[in-house]
Amino acid sequence: MRIAIVGCGNLGSAIAKALREYEVIAIRRDLSKIKLECEKSSKISDAKKCDVVILTLKPQDFREIEMDFQDKVVISFMAGVSVEELKRVSKKVVRAMTTLAAEYGESFVTYCCEGISPDEEERILKILKKLGEPIKVDEEVVNTSTAFASSIAFVSELIEALTFAGVRQGIKRDVAEKLSILTFRSCVKLVENYDFRKLKYSVATPAGATVEGLAKLMECKAAWCLQEAFCSAAKKFKS
Ligand SMILES: NC(=O)c1ccc[n+]([C@@H]2O[C@H](COP(=O)([O-])OP(=O)(O)OC[C@H]3O[C@@H](n4cnc5c(N)ncnc54)[C@H](OP(=O)(O)O)[C@@H]3O)[C@@H](O)[C@H]2O)c1
């Protein structure tokens, strides 16, 4: 199957790497910036040679560019671009959202479809599974899940903060960074296997050090700040 990736920048390249077993055409104007072992093109019309067209353009660029893929299945990962808008370029549309971790097949992939037959959906699912875990939801949820894609940046901030805290306590930066990343990785492993609401009680001893740290997080409203960051991002995508 041939797949075109139109707007092959950060997210497009991550998706292209995950789809290496397919015949991919990577499309963007500046071909020198495509660091992928696949066919490259600077012409969006070359996407018509493919069975599936993946759109990873910035929404403002998409809205300014003329394109027509009427008989092709179009999968869009563009934040805030509705199914209604996508129908301008094809009758068969999948609106999806994912994260840069799609490159490693480790992302969520929320999606909804319109004009797609059950056979086509099965083929699309095979593609989406290469990016991680597909979850079929209503369009509204695809839209809001964009804030989970943004949360990759929020969590990166937390990793950096923990690294800095280690440095404040006298640990060398490279060691603190490693410890911080491993702590997040360990936490993900644990929450996948245990109830995350109970996890803190397995770590904290009554009147111990962890519980003091947790109390400080509550005092600083750290969880509330994270919620606010998420909701601000979600609000922006809805506007
Ligand atoms: N980055 C993320 O983590 C992430 C996560 C989820 C969703 N998204 C969504 O993915 C989309 C892309 O985001 P991004 O971060 O990957 O942006 P990006 O790196 O800027 O990629 C967009 C690409 O589109 C290309 N482009 C612009 N105009 C074009 C044209 N006329 N013809 C062909 N290519 C054109 C640009 O390359 P040239 O200038 O060389 O043409 C650019 O590399 C956005 O809609 C965003 O909402 C991103």
Image (cartoon, grey):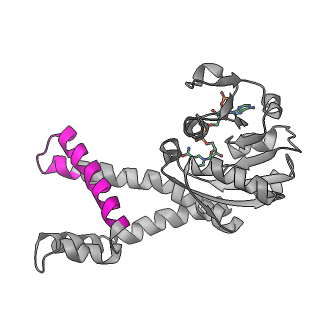
Q: Is residue 25 left or right of residue 109?
A: right
Quadrant holding the C terminus: bottom right
Q: In the figure, is residue 34 to the left or right of 204?
A: right
Magenta-colored stretch includes residue 182: yes
Q: Is residue 144 magenta?
A: no
Q: Give the range drawn in magenta.
A: 165-192
Please, which residue is most extreme toward the bottom here? Answer: 206
Camera-side residue of 93 and 31: 93
Please tell me which residue is depicted at 51% across the width and 54% down the height of the picture. Answer: 150
| Prevailing secondary structure of the magenta residues | helix
**Position in image of residue 214 (x %, y %):** 23, 72
Residue at the image position 37 percent from the left and 51 percent from the top: 157
Specify the quadrant that holds the N terminus. Answer: top right
Q: Is residue 162 above or below residue 72?
A: below
Q: Quadrant of residue 84?
A: bottom right
Quadrant housing residue 171: top left
Locate residue 69, reporting x and y percent. Answer: 85, 41
Q: Which of 14 and 123 is in front in this view?
A: 123
* Residue shown at the point (13%, 76%) measured from the top left: 205
In the rendering, at what x and y percent does residue 175 appear? 18, 41
User: Which residue is rendered at x = 31% and y = 48% of the image?
Assistant: 160
Kindly tell me whether residue 158 is visible in this rendering.
yes
Residue at the far top: name it: 32
User: Compared with residue 23, is residue 120 higher up or lower down, i.e. above or below?
Assistant: below
Residue 93 or 212: which is nearer the viewer? 93
Residue 40 x %, y %: 68, 23
Q: 49 above or below 130?
A: above
**Number of marks in the rendered image:** 0
